[in-house]
């Protein structure tokens, strides 16, 4: 089955800096790669996703890149703000959706 | 109102007790899932259901059972709770094509003492 590894487990950045979270997956058949943001006391919320026929997708300050050959994908957040502080999860799906272990992002004002 | 509602939000129960966690959705999605979240382990799938008559085990189904009472309702039961089932539990839904990813509930924090 699919195995998703996510790094780093914690990330602290200064407000205004960029943050990058990386994930690798094992199943070359995976074709859908969502990213979720989980704020304290809430369930994960989908913030951006990418399908295997696309190499990059951007939505305002967040972007996701996918390298199918290397089987890795990354989340990029630019101009970080304190409200970006949360736990971020990547996931990869073929038949099943498998999640990474999460990255706790802290944006210091 | 939330699209995916989980009850209770918090629960403390004793070892050996039976407990049910409930999930209801107004998304009209056919697929529903139960996940368990532990620190450092991410989200692990317990059970999933593609429709009322279709129930499937996930990667960590031992010690759990589920019931899909209707398209909108999916409950998770712990027949005899044990302390290592202490965790945060999430229900999620998706449409047939999972086009927009999963919609998660706010979670149930379960503590087994």
Image (tube, coloured by chain):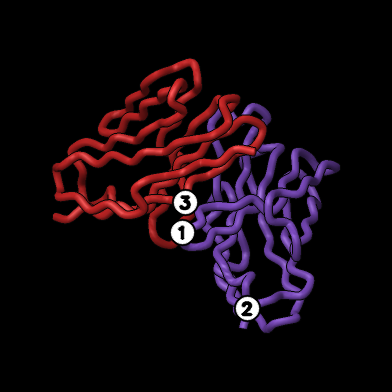
Q: In the displayed image of the protein, which residue is found farthest to the right?
A: B53
**CB atoms of marks 1 and 2 within 8 Å:** no
Counting labels gives: 3
The answer to whether residue B69 is left or right of residue A85 is right
Q: Residues within 10 Å of mark 2 (few under 14, many from 20)?
A: some
Give the colour in which the image draws chain A.
red
Determine the colour of chain B.
Answer: purple
Distance between mark 1 and mark 2 Cα atoms: 20 Å
Determine the CA span between mark 3 and mark 1. 5 Å
Residue sitting nearer the eye, A35 or B6 = A35
Local SS, label 2: strand
Disc 1, SS = loop
In the picture, the quarter occupied by the N terminus of chain A is top right
Q: Secondary structure at mark 3?
A: loop
Badge 2 is on which residue?
Answer: B112
**Residue B49, image x, y percentages:** 75, 44
Circle 3 residue:
A101
**Residue B1 seen in the current view:** no
Residue A80, image x, y percentages:
21, 43
Q: Which residue is at 55% across, 41% downward?
A: A3
**Contact, CB < 8 Å: mark 3 with mark 1?**
yes
């Amino acid at each position: 089955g699919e195995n998703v590894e996510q790094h780093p487990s914690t990330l602290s950045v200064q407000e205004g800096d960029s943050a990058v979270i990386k994930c690798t997956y094992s199943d070359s058949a995976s074709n859908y790669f969502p990213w979720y943001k989980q704020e304290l006391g809430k369930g994960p919320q989908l913030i951006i996703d990418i399908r295997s026929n696309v190499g990059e997708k951007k939505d305002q300050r967040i972007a996701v890149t996918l390298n199918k050959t290397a089987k890795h994908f990354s989340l990029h957040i630019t101009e970080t703000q304190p409200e970006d502080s949360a736990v971020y999860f990547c996931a990869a799906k073929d038949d099943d959706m498998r999640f990474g272990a999460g990255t706790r992002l802290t944006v210091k004002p | 109102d939330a699209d995916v509602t989980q009850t209770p939000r918090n629960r403390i129960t004793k070892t050996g007790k039976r407990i049910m966690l409930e999930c209801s959705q107004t998304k009209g999605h056919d697929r529903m899932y139960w996940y368990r979240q532990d620190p450092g382990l991410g989200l692990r799938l317990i059970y999933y259901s593609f429709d009322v008559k279709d129930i499937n085990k996930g990667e960590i189904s031992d010690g759990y059972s589920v019931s899909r009472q209707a398209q909108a309702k999916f409950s998770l039961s712990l027949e005899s709770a044990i302390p290592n089932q202490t965790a945060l539990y999430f229900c999620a839904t998706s449409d047939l094509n999972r086009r927009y990813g999963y919609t998660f509930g706010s979670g149930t924090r379960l503590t087994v003492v």
